[in-house]
Image (cartoon, rainbow, N blue to C red):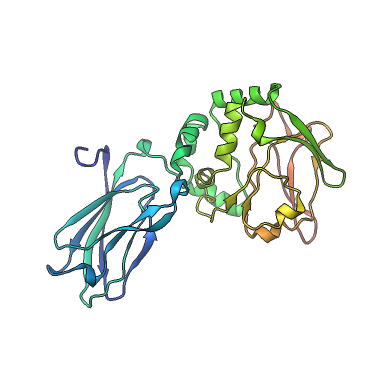
Amino acid sequence: MKITGFKLSRKVDITLFKYNFTDMLACHDDVKETRKIAFILYIVPEDWSEEDGGNLELFGCDGNLVKPKSVVRKIAPKANTLALFEVSNRSFHAVSEVLSHRPRYSITGWFHVYDDDVLQFPGIIDPMIPLITGYLNPYTTKISTNQNLIATLFTENGYQLKSFLNISSYHLLKEELCSNKIEWTENYVPNSHNYHTCDYNKLGACGVLSDLLRLFSSESFLRLLPGIGHAQTPKIHPHHDPFDREFLKSPKLWLGSLKKLKTGSFCILSDYNFESFGDHFDIFFHLIDNKWNSEFGGSITYHNPSSGLSVFTQFIYQ
């Protein structure tokens, strides 16, 4: 605690590494579960220098996107020297190629913090943490690596996370949606869809809704979700008409919209080429009455693109 500033648990991982001529380790951040402090004890010849390679390379990050940009510091191995650094979403580092024909040995490992002291979603963007901890149910801080949910995603084509928001945030959000602060506009195309939407830029009076839209359209939110967080995150562009053919031609965009559906609303099968985006995920967050059931409609049905037959139906839950 006095050295690191963190309350560490008794859990310690430790591994012996041997790097031979031309061996290297690519850039990574070491983020996994409750790791907090990484350590490296170098076991190399006394005359090992930077020219021998095997240097610890520390990367700077590109703004709030938390992606490695370039090497900002190189640390050459020194015999019987211990190096430590904090593990975080910005702790990107690498081991450069070993240029010496002598082996580079090191004892490497990680000190851990307690489960309750860490937000377990790798790659989180720092500005989003207050929104996550302020609006979401506390259990969401531990779901990104939930193996059962990840398995469900790939065996059953999806999963549902109930009670996603904390209770107070959910009720505040419903109050904003039911108020007269939002100017809803009908979006109707007879052979495609009929629902109401709103201008994202005119939600200044709806603080909770504005914050959540910002969170839901962030890279942090995607990284929070089990099985999705480590997928390649596309550029984000939530303000759009999702049925605009010209817009759909743009590659790798994060499509999102806020919709209000009522009696008579619908959204039918689309023949637009969503496959041009490659592998992608559909994410829905529903705001409905707690007495809602499948008889009220509003379910989401997926169809086989070849046969047109229904594959599965996702019913709506609060």
In terms of depth relative to the viewer, which is nearer, 139 or 52?
52
| Residue 256 appears left or right of 134 | right
| Residue 99 at x, y percent in the picture | 26, 75
How far across and how far down the image is residue 52, in percent?
Answer: 22, 72
Q: Quadrant of residue 185?
A: top right
Is residue 122 visible in this depiction of the protein?
Answer: no
Q: Residue at x 44, y 52 (%)?
A: 62
For this view, does 233 lie left or right of residue 45?
Answer: right
Depth check: 287 or 297 in front?
Answer: 287
| Residue 11 visible in the current orientation | yes
Q: Residue furthest right?
A: 190
Coordinates of residue 77 in the picture (x, y in percent): 20, 63
Rendered position, 316 above or below 96: above
Q: Residue at x 48, y 38 (%)?
A: 128
Residue 199 % position (x, y): 70, 35
- Is residue 57 shown left or right of residue 190? left
Q: Is residue 213 left or right of residue 309?
A: left
Image quadrant containing the C terminus: top right
Instruction: Place residue 291 in its image quadrant.
Output: top right
Identify the residue at the far left of this view: 46
Give the answer, above or below, for where 310 lies relative to 194.
below
Q: How many marks?
A: 0
Quadrant location, the N terminus = top left
Q: Quadrant of residue 95?
A: bottom left
Nearer to me, 276 or 148: 276
Residue located 76% across and 54% down the image: 245
Q: Residue furthest bottom?
A: 101
